Image: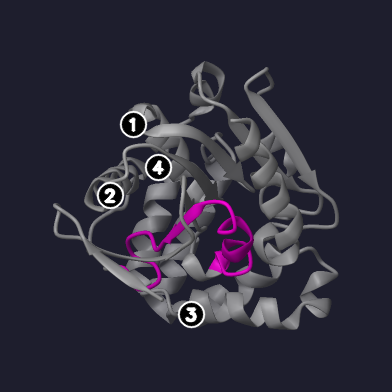
Amino acid sequence: MMKLAGLKNDLKVAYVEEGVKEPIILLHGFCGSSGYWKKVIPLLAESHRVIAVDLRGHGASLAPNEPYTMEQFAHDLALFVDELGISRFHLFGHSLGGYVTLAFAEKYADKLAGFGLIHSTPFPDDEAAKANRDKGAASIRENGMEPFIKALVPKLFAKDHVATMPDEVQMTKEIGLSTIPIGAINTLIGMRDRMDRQHVLQETNLPVLLVAGEEDQVIPSERTFTVAGDHIEQVLLPNVGHMGMLEAPEELAGAIGRFLSRS
């Protein structure tokens, strides 16, 4: 059941929650929502308290009309866990959610027991990617969400899965189309301007999980597996694109569960 939390910065944040014991927070990707995690949540909730959040401008959360920096998303999350009385937790972020996870780990590491990037990267946008963010924002301003989401969603899945997983593809489209245009535009600006956070992975004392899809057309594995070390665990999901939580939920939940048991 969807819940709503009012934060001290007047933002209303929607979230779903299942399970008990140690808390895990899951963050979705761009033009996504907590619904991205619907297949993973019950698997992890067997042993943990699982909370999936709708980031500002996404899902059922409010969409203020201002640029959404990764630091602002992280601040929202800090206020959210304070509101729920959570002092320490594991954080896993998909794509955009991974950028937010790194910003959070940089500023609020004392709140974390460990964290993970799911189909994400610590690298900033290069100039070509920044130009594409601007094109995307212009497209949404001029034409609304439908053409943008229609072009985006097939790229999120492994090529074969676009045909073999029609229900998952359709659900992803529906979630994307429900994104408020101003929320999508402000998020594109924030992603365009985000900083390089390789140093967070290199310098953290926390355990880190990095998960990539073998067939990811958005963020290839070499942009996820950028740092190695005793504190880093790398998992490559075979035959998976950018949406491991929908394309291979059991495998992804298993990787997260094994990481949690060791961290």
Tell me the element at label 1. Answer: loop
| Quadrant of res 2 | bottom left
Asked if the stretch drawn in magenta spans residue 10, the answer is: no
- For the residues labelled 1 and 3, the Cα–Cα distance comes to 32 Å
| Quadrant of res 229 | top right
| Quadrant of res 234 | top right
Tell me the element at label 4. Answer: loop
Q: Please, is residue 68 above or below residue 197 in the view?
A: below
Nearer the observer: mark 2 or 3; the answer is 2
Nearer the observer: mark 3 or 4; the answer is 3
Q: Which of marks 1 and 3 is nearer the N terminus?
A: 1
Q: What stretch is highlighted in magenta?
A: 36-61
Amino acid of disc 2? Asp
Residue 199 in the image: x percent, y percent?
A: 50, 21
- For the residues labelled 4 and 1, the Cα–Cα distance comes to 21 Å
Label 3 sits on residue: 177
Amino acid of disc 4? Asp
Q: Earlier in the sequence, mark 4 or mark 2?
A: 2
Label 4 sits on residue: 193
Residue at 56 percent of width and 19 percent of height? 202
Residue 150 in the image: x percent, y percent?
A: 60, 78
Picture quarter with the N terminus = bottom left
Residue at 64 percent of width and 31 percent of height? 262
Label 2 sits on residue: 76
